[in-house]
Each structure stands twice: as C-alpha cells, then as structure tokens.
Image: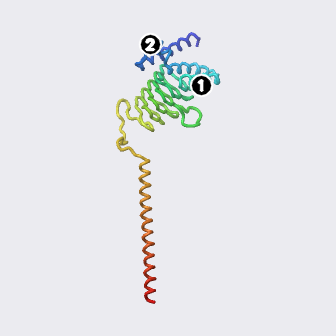
Amino acid sequence: MSWIQRWKEMREVIRADIQAVFDRDPAARSTLEVVLTYSGLHAIWMHRIAHALYKRKWFLLARIISQFNRFLTGIEIHPGAKIGKGLFIDHGMGVVIGETCEIGDYVTIYQGVTLGGTGKEKGKRHPTIEDHVLIASGAKVLGSMRIGRCSKIGAGSVVLREVPPHSTVVGVPGRVVVQNGKRVPNDLDHVNLPDPVADMIRSMQEEISRLRQEVDALKKGREAEGGEKHDVGANIQHAD
C-alpha cells in the first residue's frame, strides 16, 4: 500500500471521528471547537499514532505515547487495542481499554467505562465490541467475549458473558432485558429483591434466641435440682 493510499484512509478515519462527535453530541457547534476541545477525540488520535508504532514493534515508544495520552486526557488506551472509525468517547475521564480489546465502527463510550480482562490469562483476554454499540457511564465489560452490534450496555453494569446483537444489558452481573426490540422475560422480582445482609442478621438473631432459650432451660433445671437438695437436707434435720 502506497503512502498516498494510507493518507487517504487516515483522512477518511479522521473525518469519521469528527463527524461522530456531531452525530452524537448536540453540544458540538463547530469543527474547530471539536478539534481543539474534545479530549475523547484527542485520546483516539493519539492512540492511532501509538497503535501504528505498536504494530511496527516500537513497543516502548508506543507505551510512552499511551501514558502521555492518559496524562493529558484521563483516558487510558493500550497501544495494542484495535479501534475502528467513528469511535465517540464522551466525557471520557476514567475510560480504560485493554491491550487485546477490539472496537468496531461508530461505537459510543461514556466516562468511567472499563473494557478489561478478568485475570492474568494470556492471549485474547479483553472484549470485542462490534459496530454501533453504546456503553454507558461506569459500565465494566470484562473478559474475552463479544458484544453484538447495535447493543446497549446500561450505566454501572458489569458484563461477564457474551451479548447478542441488538440487545440491552443492565445490572450486576449484566443480563439481557431487551433483545431485537422485545422485552426478555425475567423471573427476578425487582420489587422484593433479596438482601443477603438482612438475611444473615435475621439468621443470627434466630440463633441467639435459640441459645438464650437453652440457657434459660439449663438455669431452671439447676435451680430445680438445688431446691430438691435443700428440701432433702431439711427433712433429714427434722427427723433428727
């Protein structure tokens, strides 16, 4: 591939990144404002430079740029992560994207999102995010799994398993509540949710009550035995 073709591809990616801001942020007013003030856009462009160096095995320089990117924007993207065009990171402080993560085209990520692993396993250990996925604030997507295209991950959700396309996921752990526009049946009672702490306290109170009853019964038994011995002694003295 010639440098002219590469430049054309890079220019198309840059245009898609800028247009993604206008498409998904009503506060964006001008191209100059977006280019100069959107830290999410800066983080993506710096990552593209770091990723190009990473692919050429300039690992140290790539990591230095990645850490500088984190210092400037508050967004940590490993240079090994693969990111498609049109990614929009809105209010991106605290976003973390792992080394083997793959992100498709026109994905939206909000602040505090983690696309991470679940341990020290090697190989593909971070999620694959397909096209047009939205991941809301504070969501955690952990492990090597696939988030299907056009899916939505709710704020604060923790996703540990694969998500089918066109799904909405909420909760900890994350569960699919809508798929292909239809609500997924769920047996969970959202009004009377279990409270493990309250259940444990209630169990302890029941155990304490049972132990108190046993102690009271033992005390009464000893008092009864003491009274019988006293009566026997008195009868003996009376007989004498």
Outermost residue on the bottom side: it is: 240
- Camera-side residue: 223 or 115? 223
Dots 1, 2 in contact, CB < 8 A: no
* Within-10-Å neighbours for mark 2: few <14, some 14–19, many 20+: few
- Camera-side residue: 214 or 47? 214
* Within-10-Å neighbours for mark 1: few <14, some 14–19, many 20+: some
Does 225 appear above or below 235? above
Could you say whether the residue bearing mark 2 is in a helix, strand or loop? loop
What residue is shown with label 2?
30
Q: How many circles with numbers are drawn on the protein?
A: 2
- Three-letter residue code for mark 2: Ser
Could you say whether the residue bearing mark 1 is in a helix, strand or loop? helix
Give the quarter of the image for residue 237: bottom left
Marks 1 and 2, the one that precedes in the sequence: 2
Left or right, 58 with respect to 188, comes to right
- Three-letter residue code for mark 1: Gln
* Percent position of residue 21, x then y: 45, 18
What residue is shown with label 1?
67
* Percent position of residue 190, x then y: 36, 41
